[in-house]
Image (cartoon, helix red, strand yellow):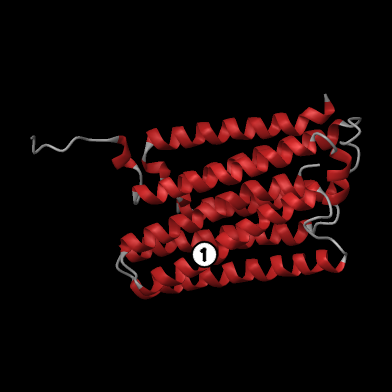
């Protein structure tokens, strides 16, 4: 057996391989969901456009800004931790988590407004996809917030790298989900 | 700070997100479904293009793929193909 280690392209991936397996898996799931949404829209684009008018685009746009800012803070935290600035890194992670909570708060306001207008998951195909996709994403935001707080506590650079990567995946899913569900007419 | 790639990525994500939202809000709506007006169609294409650019920025700068050419190209290619699929599905009702 040779002592010389074989170089693999897998070694080039930043961070842990398993988090990339998770990221790709999640992207495939959400990607399939969004493609199915667009495929069903072909049947009745007028109904989808009318249903989309009930959504709050400005609130979702604000939530996009909140999430990409939160991702910036998480990425910054990793840099700070690698520079041995632990306190600042922890602060960035907690701020990122707070922005995650803000995202959920705005999403809750959206859901409550929909419910007040008599809209639910059974209203039509658009809202079935809307609640399934945004609800599943919101569940990932909840998990991401807990992970950010966990790695702020157990703040080894490797932990922060994995936690931040999960959060960036949540971010990436949203920047695809937001235009498809809220913006495309 | 402007020399910081991460900071510039964040600013770009904010700007592109605002542009996408503004385009969707201000473009004349309701004509796309009937397939009569090219303006909402062009707006939809711009929105999808901006989503693709934002996705590439997150992969490259936030997730750190800028350090590995092989994986950056792979993910960017997959994301671009996926955006083309979404574009095809978006345009399908107008054919």
**Residue A10's x, y, as percent?**
32, 39
Number of marks in the rendered image? 1
In the rendered view, would you say A101 is above or below B51?
A: below
Viewed as shown, does residue A109 lie left or right of A34? Answer: right
Q: Quick one: SS at disc 1?
A: helix
Quadrant that contains the C terminus of chain A? top right
Q: Residue at x 57, y 57 (%)?
A: A68
Q: Quadrant of the N terminus of chain A?
A: top left
Name the residue furthest top: B95
Up-down: is A12 above or below A133?
Answer: above
Q: In the picture, residue A107 is in which quadrant?
A: bottom right
Left or right: residue B8 versus residue A80 is right
**Any part of residue A13 in sight:** yes
Residue shown at 78% from the left, 53% from the top: A127
The answer to whether residue A92 of the structure is visible from this angle is no
Hey, which quadrant is residue A6 in on the image? top left
Q: Residue at x 73, y 32 (%)?
A: B89
Q: Position of residue A108 (x, y in %)?
A: 71, 69
Q: Position of residue A177 (x, y in %)?
A: 66, 48
Query: B33 above or below A57?
Result: above
Q: Is residue B58 left or right of residue B33?
A: left
- On the image, the x and y values in percent for residue A17 come to 35, 47
Residue under the image location 40 percent in, 51 percent down:
A19
Image quadrant of residue B72?
top left
Q: Which residue is mark 1?
A: A143
A90, A10: nearer the viewer: A10
* Crowd band around label 1 with a 10 angstrom C-alpha radius: few (<14), some (14–19), many (20+): some
Q: Chain of mark 1?
A: A
């Amino acid at each position: 057996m040779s002592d010389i280690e074989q170089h693999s392209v897998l070694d080039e991936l930043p961070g842990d391989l398993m988090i990339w397996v998770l990221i790709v898996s999640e992207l495939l799931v959400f990607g399939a969901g969004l493609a199915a949404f667009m495929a069903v829209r072909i049947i009745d684009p007028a109904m989808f456009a009318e249903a989309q008018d009930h959504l709050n685009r400005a609130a979702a746009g604000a939530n996009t800004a909140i999430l990409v800012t939160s991702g910036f803070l998480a990425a910054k935290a990793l840099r700070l931790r690698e520079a041995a600035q632990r306190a600042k890194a922890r602060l960035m992670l907690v701020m990122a988590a707070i922005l995650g909570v803000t995202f959920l708060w705005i999403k809750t306001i959206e859901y409550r407004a929909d419910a007040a207008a008599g809209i639910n998951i059974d209203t039509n195909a658009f809202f079935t996809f809307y609640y399934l996709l945004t609800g599943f994403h919101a569940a990932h935001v909840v998990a991401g917030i807990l992970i950010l707080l966990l790695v702020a506590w157990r703040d080894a650079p490797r932990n922060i790298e994995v936690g931040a990567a999960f959060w960036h995946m949540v971010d990436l899913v949203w920047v695809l989900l937001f235009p498809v569900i809220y913006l495309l007419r | 700070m402007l020399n910081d790639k991460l900071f510039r990525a964040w600013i770009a994500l904010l700007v592109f997100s605002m542009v996408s939202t503004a385009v969707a809000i201000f473009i004349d709506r309701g004509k796309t479904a009937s397939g009569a007006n090219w303006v909402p169609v062009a707006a939809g294409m711009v929105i999808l293009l901006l989503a693709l650019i934002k996705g590439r920025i997150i992969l490259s700068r936030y997730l750190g793929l800028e350090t590995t050419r092989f994986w950056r190209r792979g993910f960017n290619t997959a994301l671009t193909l996926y955006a083309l699929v979404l574009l095809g599905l978006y345009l399908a009702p107008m054919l």
